Image (cartoon, rainbow, N blue to C red):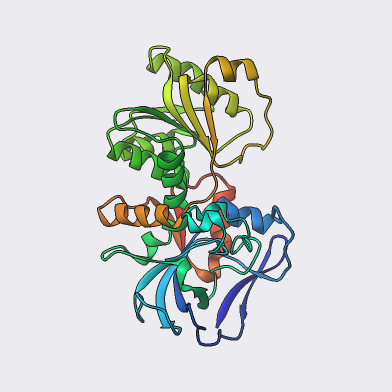
Amino acid sequence: MRALTQVADRKLELREIDAPPPPAAGEVQVRVKAIALNHLDLWGFRGMAFAKRKLPLIAGVEGSGEIAAVGDGVTGFTAGDPVVMYGGLTCGTCKACREGRDNLCENIGGIMGFHIDGFARDLLNMPARLVIPVPKGVSFRDAACAPIAYGTVEHMLFDNAKLQPGETMLVQAGGSGIGTVAIKMAKAMGCTVITTVGDDVKAEKVKALGADHVINYRTERFETITRKLTGKKGVDVVFEHVGGEGFNGSLLVLKRGGRLVTCGSTAGPSITLNLMQLFQQQYKIFGSFGASMRNIADGLAKMAKGLTPVIDMEVPLAEYERGLERIESRQVFGKIIVHF
C-alpha cells in the first residue's frame, strides 16, 4: 500500500509499504479517504517537533476514512462505515481519559503524523475507542476537518471560553482553517464577530462568511478599531492562535473580566505580560490544545446540520507538499484537503 513518509526535514517520499495485518481484538482497520492539512503538518515537515521522534515517519495529523474490517469484540462499527480518527494515541485508562478529557491524557503515546506514524497511508489499524462515526450526509472531504479544525474550535469556544449567544468576539487570523470555523460557529449562535485578516481579498471572503467587522491588520491597528467598535468597552472573548506581538493587543481589546483563549503561536511563542493589567482587568486566559472525542463528535453534528468547512484547495496524495507550500505562503483561506 502507499504511505507518504517523511524521511528528513523538508523531505517527503511516497513509498510502497506492507499493508497492516487484520485488526486485533478491540481494533478496527480504516481505509483512509482524505486528510486535512494543518500547521502541525507544516511544523513537522520543517522538523519543529516538540518531542523526540524517529524518521522515517508517516505524515498526516487529521483525516477521515471508512471501516475496512473490525476486530474481535468491536461493536458499533461495520465495514463501509464512514469515520474519523482521533489524532492522539491516548491510554484510555488514566483519570483524564476516563472523564472524557482525552486531550489531557497523562500517558499519551504521541500525536499521530507528528511524533508517531500518521494518517497519510491507504490503511491503518486503530483502537476502536479512538474512532468516531461520521453522520449521514457528511462527505469524507468535510469530515477530514473534524478532528483538529472543528474539534479545536469546539474546545476553545465552548469548553474554555464558554462563548454565549449575543456576545462579541474578536477572531484573530479569520482566514485560517480554525479562524473560518470560529467565525461560522459564532455567527450560528448569534454572536457579533470582529476579525482580522492580512489582505483585502481575505477581507471580502470573511465578510461573505458573516463576519460583522473586518480589520486588515497590515494597514490598520486592530486594537484601536476594535475598541471603537465596542464603544471602548472591549469584546467578551478573543479567539487567539497567533501569539507574537499581537498577543498583548488581544488582551487590550478585552472588556473587564473578558476571556482570551489561545491555541497557537504562529507569529512567535514568547511575549512580555503586564501582570498588573492582567489582575486589575480580571482577564481570564485559557490555553487550549487539541480536543476531546466529544468535541469532535459535536463538530461533526454541526457539519451534518449544514455548518460545513471552508475549503481552500484539494490535491491528490502525490501533491501533498504543494498543500504545505500553500499554508507556508499564508495565502491559504480555510482548509486544504488531500485526497486518496
Q: Residue 289 in the image: x percent, y percent?
A: 55, 47
Which residue is at 49% across, 37% downward? 173
Count of picture labels: 0
Say left or right for 200 vs 305.
Answer: right
Q: Residue 306 in the image: x percent, y percent?
A: 26, 52
Q: Between 107 and 158, which is closer to the camera in this rendering?
A: 107
Question: In the picture shown, does residue 280 fall above or below 163?
Answer: above
Question: In the picture shown, does residue 243 fall above or below 34?
Answer: above
Q: Residue 189 in the image: x percent, y percent?
A: 28, 37
Question: In the picture shown, does residue 43 fall above or below 113?
Answer: above
Can residue 339 be seen here? The reply is no
Say left or right for 101 vs 17.
Answer: left
Question: In the picture shown, does residue 193 fall above or below 101?
Answer: above
Which residue is at 52% across, 77% downward? 125
Q: Between 320 and 242, which is closer to the camera in this rendering?
A: 242
Q: Between 190 and 207, which is closer to the camera in this rendering?
A: 190
Can residue 330 be seen here? The reply is yes
Q: Residue 179 in the image: x percent, y percent?
A: 44, 41
Screen quadrant of the N terminus = bottom right
Q: Between 150 and 27, which is closer to the camera in this rendering?
A: 27
Which residue is at 45% across, 57% downward? 147
